[in-house]
Structure formats: C-alpha cells, structure tokens
Amino acid sequence: MMVGEAGSGGSWFQRFLLPGFALKAVIIGGGYATGRELAEYFVPAGPWGGLAGMLLATLIWSVVAALTFALARQLHAYDYRSFFQQLLGPGWVLFEVERVLVDEAGTEVALSSGEYHLLHALVRHPRQVMSRDRLLDLVRGREADIFDRAIDNLVSRLRKKIEEDPAHPQIVKTVWGGGYTLACEVKRLGPAA
C-alpha cells in the first residue's frame, strides 16, 4: 500500500506531526546538525525560549507537511517525481536536473544538495587530496570547525549511492591524514559551459 492511499493506517501523530518534527530537525540543523549547533540555537533564548521556538517550528512545519500531503493526495502523486511534475508542470526538470546521476543502464540516483555539492567539489579536483576543512568550505560555504565531522557523514552517504561496495570504495577514497580524493578520471561529455 502506498503512503497516503485511502484507508491507509497511521495515527494523526504519524501522518502529520511526526513529519513536522523531522522537517524541523532538518531546518534547524541543515542536515549537518552537531550538538554544538543545536546548543547554540538554545543559548540566546534560554531553555524555555528554545523549547517554545521548537514547538512553534514543529507546529508550522506540521501544517506545511499536512498541506503538502493533502495536495499530493489530491494530485494522486505518491512519489517525489510525479508530485513535482504535477506541481511545477514542464519546469519540473529544471528543479531536478542538477541533482540526479544516471548510470550507463539508465538508472537514476537522486542526490541531496550536500551530496551534489560534495561530488561537484571532488569532480572539479579529480585525483587531488581534499582536506575535510577544504571540502566543508566548498560544500557549506563557510569556515569549518576543526572538530566538525559532518563531511565524513556526507562522504558515507555519497558512497552508498555511487560505489558498488561502499565498505571498499573505489571512487571516493579516504587518504589517511589528508582527507578524500576522487580516484578516477573525469571527462566532459557535453560542450564546455
């Protein structure tokens, strides 16, 4: 049974409030949340102000999620691609084009924004060792905290999508004490942009 089909189970909490909690966590942490970043969110407002802010964010994003789910149900679009095709019309391709990889067999692999920017940084510097700090600067656009391990998580997620065996990577390799490198040749197939 597909999510959102008539007669599907699930409580009000699971269908509407839980997606708001998840989205709120992503919004606050940006997908790269560390304990330090979450603590910094609470410090200016104090614990009660921070909790009130989280409750308000949860309420707002629960409403956004509920409206999105209702629209998807009305459009009979229960997967990402058909939802955006119907929502954006012919322009949906522009929304998706830069974050999808297609292998030789035509199988599509969707990348998150962070995964896309990491791969883009590595592709622009093939066979060069890129430090964690440099990659974080290229991916996140800010100076990295010396203890920030978010790039390791991002590399792990990217490897799961592009490596045949993520436990023994052949494309994005770890250089101990140095960082990461794209261990393959890069060829431009289309006209230069």
Image: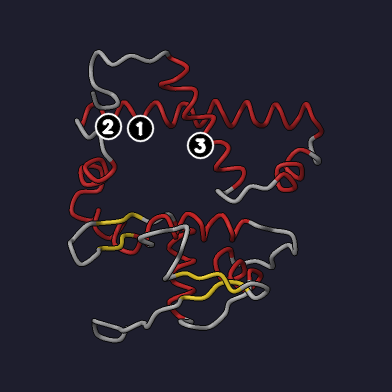
Task: Give the color scheme: rainbow, by chain, secondary structure or one colour.
Answer: secondary structure
Q: Where 59 falls versus 95 (above or below)?
A: above
For the N terminus, give its image quadrant.
top left
* Distance in Å between CA atoms under marks 3 and 1: 12 Å
Q: Residue furthest bottom?
A: 192
Q: Which amino acid does the dot numbered 2 rest on? A: Ala
Which dot marks residue 128?
A: none
Query: In terms of secondary structure, where does tag 3 sit?
Result: helix
Of residue 108 and residue 98, the one placed in the foreground of this image is 108
Callout 1–callout 2 Cβ contact below 8 Å: yes
In the picture of the structure, the residue carrying the numbered disc 2 is 72
Left or right, residue 53 beside residue 14: right
Say few, some or many: other residues with alpha carbon within 10 Å of mark 2 (under 14 / 14 to 19 / 20 or more): many
Left or right, residue 98 beside residue 169: left
In the picture of the structure, the residue carrying the numbered disc 3 is 23
Of residue 141 and residue 150, the one placed in the foreground of this image is 150
Q: Which amino acid does the dot numbered 1 rest on? A: Thr
x and y, in percent, of residue 193 in the image: 32, 83
User: Which residue corresponds to the image point at 54% horizontal and 29% vertical from the top-left?
Assistant: 21
Q: Which amino acid does the dot numbered 3 rest on? A: Leu
Q: Where 185 falls versus 180 (above or below)?
A: below
